[in-house]
């Protein structure tokens, strides 16, 4: 018989030794059950909360910058009107959300029964960084009845001026996302074409209608954000 077997036999040799072993095992089992109870019952909520994703409410406050210009455009001419926002405006706000344009004109020849000219406008996706592919955009229009035309371009991706609730990431991550001033930087180009519709009196050699005055209003909508944890 080996020495290891002798040790084991001696450990269980007397009733007193077996009682000590039983007490030890009972104590060991009690310790294991206690720690398991603490883990699964007492600390489970704390442990689970460490893996919960924080939610944030993102609110927006808008402020607009408006610029107006007029241009006399000849019959058959395509003129390009440009608009750029200064760096000082970007520095004063969190981001550039949307760009609205209104294009208006009236028949100004003064001739009797002179119909409105045909004016077409197109905000071309060149020169400025914006969400040009956003399906909510309205980038072109045409009018032959002197009706005011309206265009809209979503500049900052996913911006819609409503409070958003997001989950995950940190508060500073969302602040950094919504303060990206690259959106809207550059020059916006509006192409305007005029096709003159001659009045009946145009048959008279001294009467001519060969131009139109177009008025364009640019409204740049900037926003400031507030990012707050949702409890």
Image (spheres, rainbow, N blue to C red):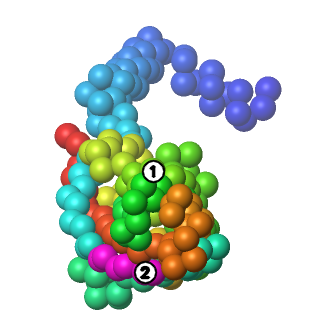
Q: Most prominent secondary structure in the magenta stretch?
A: strand
227 or 208, nearer to the observer: 208
158 or 31, nearer to the observer: 158
Is residue 109 visible to us here? yes
Residue 198 x/y as whole percent:
56, 63
Quadrant of the image occupied by residue 25: top left
Q: Which residues are magenta?
A: 67-73
Figure check: 71 above or below 22: below
User: In the rendered structure, are the residues bearing label 1 and label 2 in contact, judged by CB atoms less than 8 Å apart?
Assistant: no
Which label belongs to residue 145? 1
Separation of residues labelled 1 and 2 (CA atoms): 19 Å
The kind of secondary structure element at disc 1 is loop
Which label belongs to residue 71? 2
Q: Residue at x 37, y 79 (%)?
A: 70
Q: In what quadrant of the picture does the N terminus appear?
A: top right
Residue 190 x/y as whole percent:
53, 72
| Label 2 Cα neighbours within 10 Å, binned few <14 / some 14-19 / many ≥20 | some
Is residue 73 visible to us here? no
Residue 35 x/y as whole percent:
35, 29
Residue 172 x/y as whole percent:
33, 65
Figure check: 209 above or below 88: above
Q: Residue at x 45, y 81 (%)?
A: 72
Q: Residue at x 28, y 88 (%)?
A: 88
Magenta span includes 71? yes
């Amino acid at each position: 018989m080996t020495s290891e077997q002798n040790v084991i036999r001696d450990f269980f040799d007397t009733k007193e030794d077996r009682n000590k072993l039983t007490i030890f095992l009972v104590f060991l089992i009690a310790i294991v059950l206690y720690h398991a109870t603490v883990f699964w019952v007492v600390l489970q909520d704390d442990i689970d909360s460490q893996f919960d994703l924080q939610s944030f409410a993102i609110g927006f406050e808008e402020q607009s910058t408006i610029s107006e210009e007029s241009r006399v455009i000849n019959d058959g001419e395509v003129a390009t009107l440009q608009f750029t926002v200064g760096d000082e405006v970007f520095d004063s706000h969190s981001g550039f959300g949307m760009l609205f344009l209104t294009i208006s004109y009236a028949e100004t020849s003064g001739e009797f029964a002179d119909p409105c000219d045909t004016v077409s406008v197109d905000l071309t996706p060149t020169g400025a960084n914006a969400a040009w592919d956003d399906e909510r955009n309205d980038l072109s229009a045409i009018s032959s009845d002197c009706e005011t035309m309206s265009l809209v371009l979503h500049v900052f991706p996913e911006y819609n001026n409503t409070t958003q609730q997001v989950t995950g990431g940190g508060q500073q991550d969302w602040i950094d996302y919504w303060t990206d001033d690259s959106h809207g930087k550059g020059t916006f180009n509006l192409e305007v074409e005029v096709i003159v519709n001659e009045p009946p009196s145009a048959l008279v050699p001294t009467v001519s209608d060969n131009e139109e005055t177009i008025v364009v209003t640019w409204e740049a909508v900037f926003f400031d954000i507030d990012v707050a944890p949702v409890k």
